[in-house]
Amino acid sequence: MISISRLYYGAETGGDSIRYGRPSHGDQQLMHAIPKSAKERRPVTVWNITRTCNLRCIHCYTDSEAKWYPNELTHDIFDFLEREKIDRACFYHLVYSGRGRQMMADDLTHEESRQAMDIILERTDDFHRRGIKKDILTVDNHVDGVYLYLKLREKDPERAEEVRQLLLKGRCSACQWLNACGGALRVRADLVYKDPWAPDPACYLSDEEIGLTEEKKKELAARGEEFQQKNQEK
Ligand code: SF4
């Protein structure tokens, strides 16, 4: 999950408390907004913005007939969010797996994905410029984070540098398997270290196995990126 609103203009939103039970960076001003129990949390409403779907999974409630329906929402979704005062939106990339494999042909081209990201970034920025608080996220393609960084570098190099520094830290950043593993699960890092970019505490590979030499450890220490591993706490 990539928080466009947080990375693009540094906003910390109420969505963080819903996702993690507290603001990710421990912002005290937001602590009062955190529901103390599941009972106090407001229901999450899911809006389906399209009926077009060829998923016919037994557990699924959609009644699509796998065809294009007229009058569906386009990227006017952002006007809809503003008009209806919806404070959070999450855009999912198509994930084809299992019986949904046939959807591969319906996926966007790479160029269309880039155009979609451009619209999301532009409209998120527009909300921010006009002082409208929205929590805008994308899910299921972490390339979005890199794309966001590259776009930000053209527009605001200083902010881009801040985002770059938000990238993975500690042993994950120095790991020789990072390309294969991708840093495992960020939520675990956030819950244990209160930092979504810290190393995944559930990584059971040894320093030797991940290629973490004494020299690299010193570099991490010099950058203030020493995180005590879970198994070292016992
Ligand atoms: S979780 Fe482990 S294997 Fe994955 S990038 Fe981090 S250190 Fe490497």
Image (cartoon, rainbow, N blue to C red):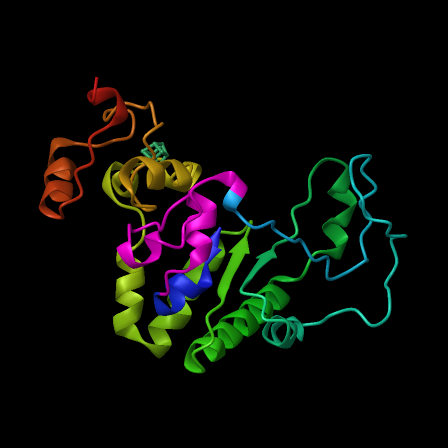
The magenta span reads 11-39
Instruction: Give the residue drawn at x 42%, y 52%.
Output: 16
When the figure is inspected, residue 66 is found, relative to residue 184, above or below; the finding is below
Q: Is residue 64 left or right of residue 184?
A: right
Q: Is residue 211 left or right of residue 11?
A: left
**Which residue is the extreme one toward the bottom?**
130
Q: Residue 158: give x, y in percent of width and height.
A: 25, 72
Quadrant of the displayed image that contains ligand 1: top left
When the figure is inspected, residue 151 is found, relative to residue 67, above or below; the finding is below
Q: Is residue 201 left or right of residue 4?
A: left
Q: Nearer the viewer, residue 21 or 145?
A: 21
Q: Residue 128: give x, y in percent of width and height.
A: 43, 76
Specify the quadrant of the image occupied by residue 75.
bottom right
Instruction: Give the residue drawn at x 51%, y 39%.
Output: 38
Specify the quadrant of the image occupied by residue 211.
top left
Q: Residue 166: give x, y in percent of width and height.
A: 30, 55
When the figure is inspected, residue 212 is found, relative to residue 163, above or below; the finding is above
**Which residue is the extreme one toward the top?**
234
| Residue 23 lies in the magenta stretch | yes
Q: Is residue 77 left or right of residue 55?
A: left
Instruction: Give the residue drawn at x 54%, y 52%.
Output: 139
Q: Quadrant of the C terminus?
A: top left
| Residue 226 lies in the magenta stretch | no
Q: Residue 231: give x, y in percent of width and height.
A: 25, 20
Specify the quadrant of the image occupied by residue 227.
top left
Q: Nearer the viewer, residue 134 or 186?
A: 134
For the image, the number of numbered tags is 0
